[in-house]
Image (tube, helix red, strand yellow):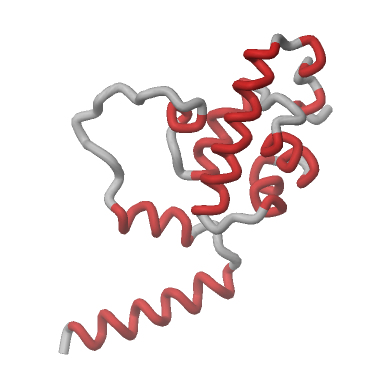
Amino acid sequence: MDPSLCDGFDSMTQDEKAFFRQLGTRIAEFRKSAAITQVQLAETLSVSQQTIASWEVGRRGVPVSMLPALARALSVSVESLIDEKAPPTKRGPAPQIQQKIERLTRLPKAQQKLVLQMLDGVLAQASR
């Protein structure tokens, strides 16, 4: 059964509904900034595109069990998704290049190949 169907949205308080609307807005923002379509995110999470759309507009609550996978798919922390301040880490934020590499791995193979060819060309020129 699709976990998104077990959200109990109709029985939620107004505060809970507001939370899920805000969460949906953040999901959409993170998804768009990562250049991921709803379809791609849905495939990654094994849910339908309609489920992603429903989460993003706050029509459905995101199951708590989906938050870690959703955060991984968007390359953000669960804390960022739920708008909580993450505890301080010794490492600091991921370097910008690492974030871009993670986004690159979600591109279709043909686009990955093109980006890698461009990168190889730039690196070859820099080493001359």
Residue pictured at 59% horizontal, 29% vertical: 22
How many numbered discs, if any?
0
- On the picture, is 76 further left or further right than 19? left
Name above or below for residue 48 compared with residue 21. Answer: below
| Front residue of 90 and 38 | 38
Question: Considering the image in quadrants, where does the C terminus appear?
Answer: bottom left
The spot of residue 8 in percent (x, y) is 78, 15
The spot of residue 19 in percent (x, y) is 60, 21
Residue pictured at 19% horizontal, 30% vertical: 90
Residue pictured at 30% horizontal, 22% vertical: 87
The spot of residue 64 in percent (x, y) is 62, 21
- On the picture, is 10 further left or further right than 17? right
The spot of residue 101 in percent (x, y) is 40, 58
- On the picture, is 58 further left or further right than 50? left
Question: Considering the image in quadrants, where does the N terminus appear?
Answer: top right
Residue pictured at 27% horizontal, 50% vertical: 95
| Front residue of 83 and 109 | 83
Name above or below for residue 42 compared with residue 79. Answer: below
Q: Quadrant of residue 125?
A: bottom left
Name above or below for residue 89 compared with residue 76. Answer: above
